[in-house]
Image (cartoon, grey):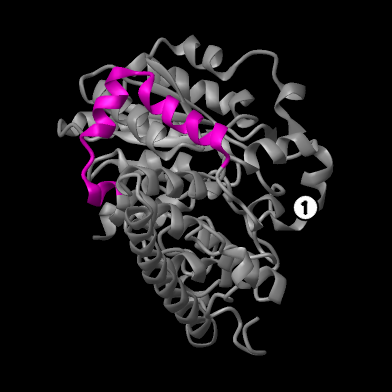
Amino acid sequence: MAAPGAAGCRFDRPRPAMRRSLVMRRFQAYDPPEYVHWEPDPAVAAEFQQALAGDPKRRAIIAGLSREQLLALYRGLLRNRLHDIQLKRWVMQGVTPKAWLGTGEEAVTIGCVHALRAGDVVGPMIRNAGACHEKGIPLADMFKVYLGTGDTPLRGRDLHLGDLRHDVVAPTSMVASLIPVMAGVALALRREGRERIALTWVGDGSVRTGEFHEGASLAAAQRVPLIIVLQNNQVALGTPYATHSRVPLAEVAGAYGGPCLAAAGNNVLDVYAATALLAAACRAGGGPAFLVAETGRMGGHATHDEGDGRRILPPAHFDYWGKRDPVGCYEAYLAATFGGGSDEGTAAVRAELAAIEATVTAEMDAAAAAALVAKTTAAPDPAMVADGVLAPDPAES
């Protein structure tokens, strides 16, 4: 463990037994139990490959990715996972009272964002925090909002981070409330005439709210260039999907007339390819589009109720989704793809991935340290509490 007083500025190095054939370090104190000694499952690895081979259009998109693009997806998954691990560590150390994590659902976020173009706008849920760092928001700001410092775009007022300078609309606690907002964003983008699109995520439970239907209906009526990702992690706060829904999410999306695709939500390449196809449809005037991504929540709604999450969902849920760890599965795919089938080639790929992990870990350490410094040096200014709440009055300019 880190020395007393280190407050999480460096990641703990686990026992060597935890590494085994993996590249990414596993953390017994912070990872789901199913991830601590994770090893690739041959049947799951075959399933990962089959998902990529089934659709010729998706297969062509993936075949067109460069080595650097494939490795960039790995970096994104690592950033997302290590960001959440750092937050959980802070919770356990008492630095912050709780955190909302996307552990096990990273591929739904990273695959979507990487399939977009510069200038496209995203509206994440808090569980899609990876969208923020992949769109360029500094990691330090992502940590600072949990500490309430005054030197972020939110000025210490909230932890739902967004920054329009990076084309990220801030999330909201009322998850589906962002659907009509993003429909409006997409309408504005279409009026610009620059082929920019918008993308937002919504959970399986919040699909049942009035705001989702109102926003999706507006998007459909106006044919706006918006992708709505239906992120089914199998539970709405504390209610399993089978309890709150009777029909598949694809049937819900079909009510609005736009294209709808399904993707294996823990397969970052399948998510990437499906998003790329829907983005092309939206740019061609075929929006709104829907992506149904099946994934699995590996903890609680937040860190405060992880025990409840384990009681609400059966052990089979965690066993099934635990075998489909998005980071581990993609790591195994890269080793098999670039390793050339030889031990030497596989070892070289793993060394390359380990170097990427070391770089991302250093980024995370530096960002967490900067946030902790800001906690003591950048308190919010009460005089600025109303700044940015309303647009400037033209009469006063």
Position of the N terminus, as image quadrant, is bottom right
Give the residue at x 82% y 47%: 308
- The number of discs equals 1
Q: Name which residue type carries label 1.
A: Asp
Question: Which residue does the numbered mark 1 point to in the structure image?
Answer: 305
Residue situated in front as seen by the camera: 185 or 293: 293
User: In the rendering, at what x and y percent does residue 354 appear?
Assistant: 40, 65
Q: Looking at the picture, does residue 307 appear above or below residue 258?
A: below
Q: Position of residue 129 (x, y in %)?
A: 48, 53
- Residue at the extreme left: 194
Q: Residue at x 38, y 49 (%)?
A: 335
The magenta segment = 41-70
Q: Looking at this view, is 286 or 356 the one in front?
A: 356
Expressed as whole percent of the image width and height from the top left, the position of residue 16 reads 59, 71
- Tell which of 100 and 19 is nearer to you: 19
The image quarter in which residue 146 lies? bottom right
Image location (x, y in percent) of residue 109: 45, 43
Residue 167 showing in the rendered view? no
Q: Would residue 136 be seen by someone viewing this image from the given angle?
A: yes
Residue 42 included in the magenta stretch of the image: yes
| Residue drawn at the location 40% of the way across and 31% of the way down | 270
- Compared across the picture, whether 118 is left or right of 273 comes to left
Vertical order, 45 against 141 (above or below): above
* Residue 3, placed above or below residue 9: below
Tell whether position 296 is magenta.
no
Query: In terms of depth relative to the viewer, which is nearer, 281 or 271?
Result: 271
Give the side of residue 375 with respect to residue 194, left or right.
right
